[in-house]
């Protein structure tokens, strides 16, 4: 294996995304050969001879030194199996398959965070048939409804009243037994705004406040929100770093909610976008990520 050869696992529709291009640019600056590989073009064989157990587009492939999955909430069983196969063969994977698993399921990630004594909104898994009276008694309204997996603000709804909650369940077809959804207390201090914190190797490398422009309760940049640089204080740093550690993430996007002068963890992402962070804070997030990967590979002094 070439000691400067890595793969970014990213679906081909994201090959021209801002983050992909910035990572390629920074890898090239630091003399690391990088290749984009759509994980759906990879076949794996499980046998004693590991050397040729990876095929790309039907052809045997040499193993890279490292693999950097950028599939996030779109990590299917197949992609997860591919990532684990690389790990089994001694390839460095950033983030690990276990860490990706930890955050793909929003309920499971909250269970881990709660076990680590970190502040999160009160959260409940809804079971079918959904008992609206039970939800009102134990969570109350307004409330946030989320699908178990999802990103960029998709699959997140606000029910301001019990009546609206019932209507939402019907309109979004969330009453179907196949849907796994959670409901969370609504944190009123954070309406239309939150913090996005980027953590690399247990260090905060960027922080911005996101704010919606149209009274949407969600503040995601991808949903039309705007960003502002935000000064990192001890509370923000501690919550962000500790949540990343608890979930086993080398690289994480931590979303924090404002709550009565403090903060609660909204969610943590294993595949954070950083176009907004670089745009609004002028931080070189891609450079921080690549420098960390070099450090992990023992190339930091080259």
Image: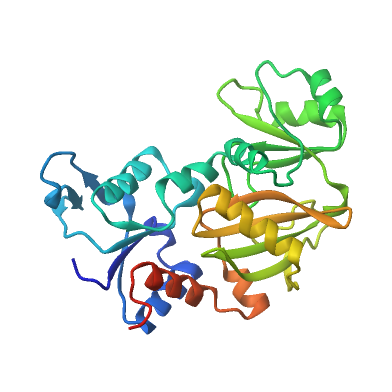
Residue at 76% of width from left, 17% of height from top? 131
**Along the line of sight, the residue nearer the viewer: 142 or 174:** 142
Left or right: where 251 falls relative to 13:
right
Picture coordinates of residue 73, whole percent (x, y)? 51, 47
The answer to whether residue 223 is seen in the rendering is no
The answer to whether residue 204 is seen in the rendering is yes
Residue at 71% of width from left, 50% of height from top? 265
168 relative to 99, above or below: above
**Along the line of sight, the residue nearer the viewer: 235 or 107:** 235
Left or right: where 239 falls relative to 274:
right
Residue at 55% of width from left, 58% of height from top? 252
Picture coordinates of residue 76, whole percent (x, y)? 41, 41
Picture coordinates of residue 199, whole percent (x, y)? 58, 64
Which colouring convention does the figure follow? rainbow
Residue at 60% of width from left, 40% of height from top? 112
> In which image quadrant can residue 33 be found?
bottom left
């Amino acid at each position: 294996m070439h000691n400067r050869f890595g793969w970014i696992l990213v679906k081909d529709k994201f090959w021209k995304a801002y983050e992909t291009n910035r990572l390629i640019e920074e890898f090239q600056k630091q003399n690391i050969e990088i290749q984009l590989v759509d994980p759906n073009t990879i076949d794996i064989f499980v046998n004693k001879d590991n050397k040729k157990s990876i095929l790309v587009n039907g052809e045997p492939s040499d193993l890279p030194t490292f693999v950097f999955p950028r599939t996030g909430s779109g990590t299917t069983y197949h992609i997860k199996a591919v990532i684990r196969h690389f790990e089994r063969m001694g390839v460095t994977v950033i983030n690990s398959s276990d860490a990706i698993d930890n955050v793909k399921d929003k309920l499971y990630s909250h269970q881990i965070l709660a076990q680590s004594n970190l502040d999160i909104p009160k959260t409940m898994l809804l079971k079918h048939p959904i008992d609206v009276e039970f939800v009102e008694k134990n969570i109350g309204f307004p409330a946030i409804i989320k699908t178990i997996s999802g990103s960029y603000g998709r699959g997140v709804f606000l029910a301001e009243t019990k009546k609206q909650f019932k209507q939402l369940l019907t309109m979004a077809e969330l009453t179907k037994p196949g849907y796994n959804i959670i409901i969370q207390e609504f944190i009123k201090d954070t309406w239309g705004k939150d913090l996005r914190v980027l953590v690399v190797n247990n260090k905060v490398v960027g922080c911005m406040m996101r704010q919606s422009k149209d009274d949407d309760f969600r503040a995601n940049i991808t949903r039309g929100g705007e960003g502002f640089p935000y000064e990192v204080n001890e509370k923000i740093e501690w919550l962000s770093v500790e949540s990343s550690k608890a979930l086993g993430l080398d690289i994480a996007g931590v979303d924090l909610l404002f709550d009565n002068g403090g903060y609660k963890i909204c969610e943590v992402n294993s595949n954070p976008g950083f176009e907004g962070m670089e745009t609004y804070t002028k931080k070189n997030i891609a450079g921080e990520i690549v420098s960390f990967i070099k450090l992990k590979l023992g190339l930091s002094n080259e």
